[in-house]
Amino acid sequence: MALVEYADAAPEVRVVFDDIKATRGVADVNNFWKALAVHPPTLKRTWESLKQVMAPGALDPLTKEMLYLAASAAAGCAYCTASHTAAARAKGMTDAMHGELLAVLGMAAETNRLAEALRVPIDQGL
């Protein structure tokens, strides 16, 4: 997989990289963005969407990161799980919170499999 480094990036990629760095307060973008930069329209679209979804709203930033972490772990994406674990920790996720998140994720996976295997009908009123 090719990674586009800032020094080698096209001007439209540098604009997105600069926005990522400024928004996140980091010196460099991570490898996910460098990989997406091989197709500048996808890089820009993905960054704009992510920036909008993860912006402050009804859910606080830590909750959003923990949801992203749970979805990434459930999907089996090691890269996203590592990235959003780090982001959640930076926003205040403690070891205890991480442990509970993993416990809920594991329990949901187990009960989801059981409900599907048993073909449990959905209760009226749910």
Image: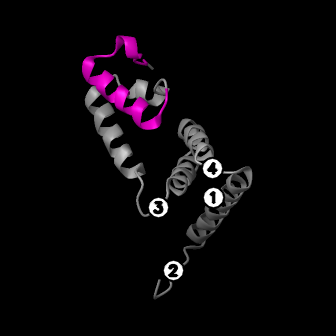
Q: Is residue 105 magenta?
A: no
Residue placed most toward the observer, 21 or 101 = 21
Q: Residue farthest to the bottom?
A: 124
Q: Residue drawn 68% across and 56% down?
A: 97
Separation (CA) of disc 4 from disc 3: 15 Å
Secondary structure of the residue carrying tag 4 is loop
Residue placed most toward the observer, 28 or 74 = 28
Separation (CA) of disc 2 from disc 1: 22 Å
Residue on which disc 4 sits: 92
Residue on which disc 1 sits: 105
Separation (CA) of disc 4 from disc 2: 39 Å
The answer to whether 118 is drawn above or below residue 109 in the figure is: below
Secondary structure of the residue carrying tag 1 is helix
Secondary structure of the residue carrying tag 2 is loop
Q: Earlier in the sequence, mark 4 or mark 3?
A: 3
The circle on residue 59 is 3
Q: Label 2: how many residues lie within 10 Å, few (<14), some (14-19) or many (20+)?
A: few
Q: Nearer the viewer, mark 3 or mark 2?
A: 3
Separation (CA) of disc 1 from disc 3: 19 Å
> Do residues under tags 4 and 2 come within 8 Å of each other at their CB atoms?
no
Magenta segment: 2-26
Q: Earlier in the sequence, mark 1 or mark 4?
A: 4
